[in-house]
Amino acid sequence: MRTYPFIYTINHIQKINTTTIKERLSRKPHDLFSPHRTDFFMIYLFTEGEGKHIVDFEEIEVKPNHILFISKGQVHAFDPTESYDGRALIFTQDFFCRTSHDCQFLQSTILFKNIFHQAFFDVKNNFDKLYDLFIEIFNELKNPVDHKQSEILHNLLYRILLLSEREIEFQEGFEKKQSLQHNIVLSFIQSVEENYKQQKKLVFYTDLLRVGIRSLQIATAKELNKTPKDIINDRVILEAKRKLTYENILIKEIAYDLGFEETTNFIKFFKLKTGLTPNEFKDSI
């Protein structure tokens, strides 16, 4: 499965870009209709039409006035029969993370780190504001590069993220609280994302986060209704399914990449968690 790097178009300096969805699809239609990863973040503001967008095995029904956020590294694909259009915006982590506060925001925002479901929702009364911000970014990218441009683009992107975060929190009745348990879960999920291939033992994460096993268990149960071990296993299974579905590699190669010393251990683990062997899962796709 291919991973796409950041794409420059009208501006070859700034690692932020926006265009229409149809224009983006016209560049590499066959590749984008197939499951792929990107090493940048994406935001799609849909303006018209309908169709589907697949993100990590979740089929999203595209609707006008809805917005979709996809984090770097996720597997997604456009619908080859789509009739939708809108604005596509992409940016890299390096572009956004100017300060430690920026990095903390990107790592914890419900838009890209939604611990409940993929962030896709109706923007309601914010549609015109958001659309205008997309256009402002587009117009700024056409201007000659100067020492203010990067900061202006960063500010416009931040406004898109903050307006969107406010909307999704309001719709889901989610009051953003910096509670200890919520922060523990976010830190745990981030640590799992960075280490799950090499580290599957819970004690590694509790030592890393300097939190007791019981405290972590209480936090994940309250926030996600899952055990910490469930979260580690779910991440391993997701990556295994991605590779089995989208990559033409041997089972033993998948096992090795996911940190299993023996292929048989991986097969037993996969069947225990899914009810199928890896080969049975491939045949069922």
Image: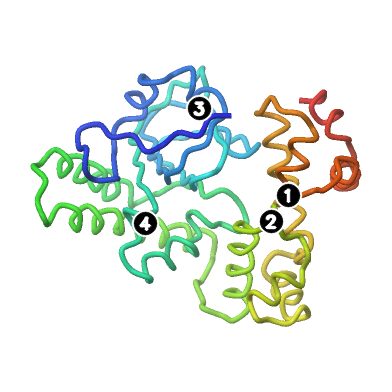
- Residue pointed to by mark 4: 161
- Which structural element holds mark 1? helix
Q: Where residue 210 sits in the image (x, y, percent)? A: 65, 81
Foreground disc of the pair 1, 3: 1
**Residue type, mark 2 in image:** Tyr
81 w.r.t. 96: above or below: above
Q: Are marks 4 and 1 in contact (CB under 8 Å)?
A: no
Decide which of 11, 126 is in the foreground and name it.
11
Estimate the spatial distance between the alpha carbons at disc 1 and disc 3, rounded to whole Å. 25 Å
Return the disc, 4 or 3, that comes first in the chain's sequence.
Answer: 3
Return the disc, 2 or 3, that comes first in the chain's sequence.
Answer: 3
11 w.r.t. 179: above or below: above
**Residue type, mark 1 in image:** Val
- Which structural element holds mark 3? strand
- Which structural element holds mark 4? helix
Give me the disc on residue 236.
1
